[in-house]
Amino acid sequence: MTKNITLAGSNPEITSSHYLLQLEGKLRAIIELKPTSESDNWLLFVHMSYDGDTAGTTSFNLYGYSRDEAETLAANLKDNAFLMKEIDDYLWGESD
């Protein structure tokens, strides 16, 4: 699911995008993709819940991504092995 929202007081063509994703099992995420003041740079916020309870929020800086590239990454976050490992490490820590 995607929803574009215009940021208050900003250029109406610069919007944030939101995605609701089932990451794995009962882990779900609301993904928020926000533009920065620098073109081709984005903030990617991942708000997670597990079985309906808040599990945490983490964020990533995306440098050098076009809007289309950033939106594709956000919409398909679970297909990005690097970001999913970072999310896993955030949630569970690095354990053997």
Image (spheres, grey):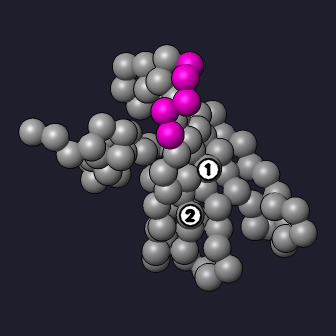
In percent of width and height, residue 94 lies at: 20, 45
* In the image, residue 9 above or below residue 83: below
Magenta segment, which residues?
52-56
From this viewpoint, which residue is outermost toward the left? Answer: 96
For the residue pair 44 and 39, the one nearer the viewer reads as 44
According to the image, label 2 marks what residue? Answer: 43
From this viewpoint, which residue is outermost toward the right? Answer: 9
* In the image, residue 63 above or below residue 24: below
* In the image, residue 37 above or below residue 2: below
**In the picture, residue 88 is in which quadrant?**
top left
Q: CA distance from mark 1 to mark 2?
A: 8 Å
Res 32 visible: yes
Q: Are marks 1 and 2 in contact (CB under 8 Å)?
A: yes
**In the picture, residue 2 is in which quadrant?**
top right
Residue 77 part of the magenta-drawn span:
no
According to the image, label 1 marks what residue? Answer: 32
In percent of width and height, residue 51 lies at: 49, 17
Sequence-first tag of 1 and 2:
1
For the residue pair 88 and 83, the one nearer the viewer reads as 88
Quarter of the image with the N terminus in it: top right
Residue 55 part of the magenta-drawn span:
yes
Q: Could you tell me what secondary structure mostly forms the magenta stretch? A: strand
Neighbour tally class for label 2: few under 14, some 14-19, many 20 plus, Cα within 10 Å: some
In percent of width and height, residue 69 lies at: 49, 62
Res 79 visible: no
Instruction: Say what secondary structure mark 1 lies in.
Output: strand
Hey, what amino acid is under mark 1?
Glu
Quarter of the image with the C terminus in it: top left
From this viewpoint, which residue is outermost toward the bottom? Answer: 38
For the residue pair 21 and 68, the one nearer the viewer reads as 21
Taking the spot 44% from the left edge, 43% from the top edge, the residue there is: 76
